[in-house]
Amino acid sequence: MLCSRRRYGRYFNYFEDIDSMCGRAACTLDPDNICKACSFKDPNTKKYYAPQWINFNDNWNYKPSHNLAPTDVFPVLVSGKHFPNSVSTNEAVIHPMIWGMIPPWHKGSINDHKLTTHNCRLEHITESRLYSEPLRHGSRCAMICDGFYEWQTTRGSRRQPYFIFAPQDSGVKIEDESTWENSWSEEKGWHGPKLLKIAGLFNTWKSAEGKTLYSFTIITMESNESLSWCHHRMPAILDKEEDVANWLDFGKVTLKSALNLLQPVKCLSWYLVDTLVNNSRNKDPLCNKPLTTVKKSASSNLLTSWLKRKEENKERSQEDGVTSSKLMKVVNIENE
């Protein structure tokens, strides 16, 4: 594009979101259920335990949403070892963090460093000025979400959004909360929607006021056959509990071993969604619903509106002493 970033900054932000890999996601569970959904099985007791929810970000809190974008806050899995003076466990904890790593050398507000930092490429991660240092210091994390949105890049100028998520148990629909049991026990663990855990890196940044903020990036890699039909890159998804634990455990798992854990997953599910998700300010629950559901909902709303107008016209015509049949027009509504 030849236009000025300063003059058209908000348009650049909009298009960068949908052009870059994995620039939008949904995360709709509350903190308590997120902790339960990310529970681990203790190898000794054979019982499940839920990670502790902590937050050392001043005034930056997670808000469940069907359409989260960079600079929004996500729940993030990290090792409790990163908080030795504040957390009593060395196991995994969940900390809300800002999506899009803020460069530690940046001076100013969190939004004006002008770098796209919500994704980092696996191929160059060890050489990056921004990402190599937290990588060496073991600042490994995993973003938690219901699923992420991707725009298909093989249809010319038209970009079709998809919602991509983990395969669910029989009877569970990721887009329909009425099918979520959301139960948990130490013996059986979590019974509810299966969430995605995407490998990433986090870092801290101090503002001019001396406040410490936690922000993160997710790691991307070349797509395999499971997602290459949509986009040439995909996020580094950790689909096994053991892989999540090992990725987070920087004390026992070496950097080389950790990076070897990052492989393109083959087991993913997806469906078409409406383009209303294109606007990151749109938080409508319809954002992650299948496209057919959105169309039916829109058609149903149109039918309801028409019936309401019909009833109002009938009452008005009766008041005027005129039969409603003389005022009404036949309206055909196609319900897709």
Image (tube, rainbow, N blue to C red):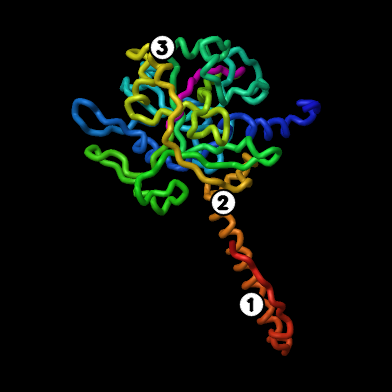
Lower position in the chain sequence, tag 1 or tag 2: 2
Boundaries of the magenta span:
197-208
- Residue on which disc 2 sits: 291
- Residue 141, percent across and down? 44, 23
Main SS of the magenta part reads strand
SS for dot 2? helix
**Label 1 – label 3 distance at C-alpha:** 70 Å
Does 202 appear in magenta? yes
Q: Nearer the viewer, residue 270 or 311?
A: 270
> Residue at 64% of width from left, 16% of height from top?
107
> Residue at 32% of width from left, 44% of height from top?
191
Label 1: how many Cα within 10 Å (few below 14, some 14–19, many 20+) = few
- Residue on which disc 1 sits: 311
> Residue at 49% of width from left, 42% of height from top?
270
Q: Nearer the viewer, residue 316 or 68?
A: 68
**Label 1 – label 2 distance at C-alpha:** 30 Å
- Residue 265, percent across and down? 43, 30
Mark 3: amino acid: Lys
Question: In the image, which disc is placed on residue 256?
Answer: 3
- Position of residue 267 relative to residue 100, above or below, is below
- Position of residue 180 relative to residue 1, above or below, is below
